[in-house]
Image (cartoon, rainbow, N blue to C red):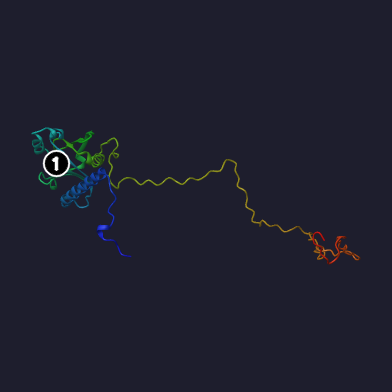
């Protein structure tokens, strides 16, 4: 059987506009996270592992970018980072202003010296606050598309967020929970199971039993001697062996 030409083959099923936009955002997030991992990877310590990351930025509120004539100024005053949390440190990877790609390491701080607080949920621009031991506290803003990743980072840093992971959560570090045992029916009190009788169900007849003798002549009984069948009656008006039609 020959295959149809490519122009006659059916394409992918139609997707809604919202699904296509969501897929495009996820691909962009994956590309940004992969680029940040390539930049951060050579700076990690032996055995250090990356757990979660999200894109954040500091500076003026994003709502000012909607105002005319000052949106360029607001964008120049903002600093964008890709924050990567590892099992030991918190890494800030700088994002280029021109191509919006992670390209350098801004700074790294131990996780023990970072405290997250003051999470503010927003429809478009949620934000939270980070306090450091040897740096000035800073408020980080995120886009709504990166809110799940940001909530995961806050949970790892020990902050309880409504709807987020528990404090201290780490990927692959949750204790294993065995599945619940299967249901086992319980017998009522004072219940005793019926003993099993290995004897077969068929029981032989008791001793002394004898089947009735089989009489071969019981089915058919010959007529008594001297029996003669009754003579065949004939119509007196019709002689034997003669047929008379109607009117004869």
**Residue 177 shown left or right of residue 70 in the figure:** right
| Quarter of the N terminus within the rendering | bottom left
Name the foreground residue: 242 vs 44. Answer: 242
Find residue 210 and report its horizontal and vertical position in percent: 79, 61
Residue 205 in which image quadrant:
bottom right
The structure residue drawn at horizontal position 23% and vertical position 44%, both measured from the top left corner, is 21
| Quarter of the C terminus within the rendering | bottom right
Name the foreground residue: 187 vs 245. Answer: 245
Find residue 58 and report its horizontal and vertical position in percent: 14, 37
Name the foreground residue: 13 vs 27. Answer: 13
**Residue where numbered disc 1 is placed:** 80
**Residue 106 shown left or right of residue 161 in the figure:** left
**Residue 208 shown left or right of residue 185 in the figure:** right
For mark 1, give the secondary structure: strand
Q: Residue 46, can we see it? A: yes
Name the foreground residue: 182 vs 241. Answer: 241
**Residue closest to the far front:** 247
Please say if 185 is above or below 221.
above
Please say if 6 is above or below 44.
below
Find residue 43 and report its horizontal and vertical position in percent: 15, 50
Residue 200 in which image quadrant:
bottom right
**Residue closest to the far bottom:** 241
Find residue 238 and report its horizontal and vertical position in percent: 85, 62
**Residue closest to the far right:** 226
């Amino acid at each position: 059987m020959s295959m149809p030409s490519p122009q006659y083959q059916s394409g992918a099923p139609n997707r809604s506009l919202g699904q296509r936009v969501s897929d495009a955002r996820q691909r962009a997030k994956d590309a940004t996270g992969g680029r940040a991992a390539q930049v951060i990877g050579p700076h990690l310590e032996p055995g250090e592992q990356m757990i979660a990351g999200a894109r954040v930025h500091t500076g003026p509120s994003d709502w000012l970018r909607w105002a005319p004539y000052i949106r360029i100024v607001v964008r120049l005053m903002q600093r964008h980072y890709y924050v990567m949390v590892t099992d030991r440190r918190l890494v800030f990877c700088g994002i280029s202003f021109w191509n919006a790609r992670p390209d350098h390491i801004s700074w790294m701080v131990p996780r023990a010296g970072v405290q997250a607080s003051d999470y503010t949920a927003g429809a478009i621009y949620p934000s939270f606050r980070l306090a450091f031991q040897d740096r000035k506290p800073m408020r980080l803003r995120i886009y709504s598309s990166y809110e799940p990743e940001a909530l995961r980072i806050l949970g790892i840093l020990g902050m309880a967020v409504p709807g987020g992971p528990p404090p201290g959560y780490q990927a692959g570090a949750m204790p294993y929970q065995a599945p619940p045992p299967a249901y086992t029916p319980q017998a009522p009190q004072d219940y005793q199971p019926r003993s099993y009788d290995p004897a077969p169900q068929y029981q032989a007849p008791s001793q002394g039993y004898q089947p009735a003798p089989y009489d071969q002549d019981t089915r058919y009984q010959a007529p008594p001697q001297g029996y003669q069948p009754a003579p065949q009656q004939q119509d007196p008006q019709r002689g034997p062996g003669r047929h008379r039609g109607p009117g004869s």
